[in-house]
Image (cartoon, rainbow, N blue to C red):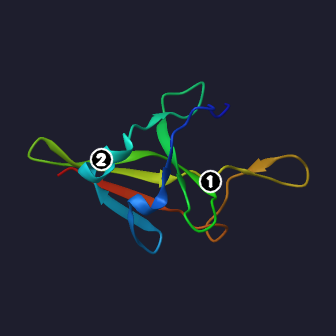
Amino acid sequence: MALKKNIPVYPADLFTWKGTHGFTEASDLKAVNFNPSQVWDDSCDVGFYLRSPNTGAKKLFTYAGHDHQDNEIVATMFESFDPPQETQRGVYKLAGKGVRPRFTLTIYND
């Protein structure tokens, strides 16, 4: 599983943040031509990077689900992907709770 090289990068300040949760309306993303793309070369997961305006660091977000009401999608959710960490023996383990915060995003359809 290898990350694709052409994953789109968007500024994190497109979202309003409350702690580790960001939210925005879909119409606010039209100006940046928002279009999540395939993340890994061997799967159909879609996502994008957000770049911090303060540090320049990028964080990968992948599709996590959607919320629907009356047969319409009202919100789409993404969450940060925290890659496995390598242990001293070269064995990978998933980043556990408390290791790094999990960030979530909600894009409301308006």
* Vertical comparison of 94 with 20: above or below: above
Task: Name the residue located 36 percent from the left edge and 51 percent from the top edge.
Answer: 77
Q: Is mark 1 on a helix, strand or loop?
A: loop
Q: What distance separates the C-alpha of mark 1 from that of mark 2?
A: 20 Å
In the image, 75 versus 90, the foreground residue is 75
Relative side of 47 to 82, left or right: left
- Tell me the tag on residue 66: 2
Question: How far from the left and from the top, in percent, is residue 25?
Answer: 26, 55
Q: Is mark 2 on a helix, strand or loop?
A: strand
- Tell me the tag on residue 82: 1
Q: Can you name the residue that lies furthest to the top here?
A: 42
Q: Earlier in the sequence, mark 1 or mark 2?
A: 2
In the image, 10 versus 42, the foreground residue is 10
The answer to which image quadrant residue 7 occupies is top right
Question: How far from the left and from the top, in percent, is residue 75?
Answer: 25, 51
Query: Type of residue at label 1?
Result: Asp
Relative side of 79 to 27, left or right: right
Question: How far from the left and from the top, in percent, is residue 9?
Answer: 52, 45
Query: Type of residue at label 2?
Result: His
Q: Can you name the residue that lies furthest to the front here?
A: 31
Task: Name the residue located 56 percent from the left edge and 62 percent from the top edge.
Answer: 52
Q: Can you name the residue that lies furthest to the right here?
A: 89
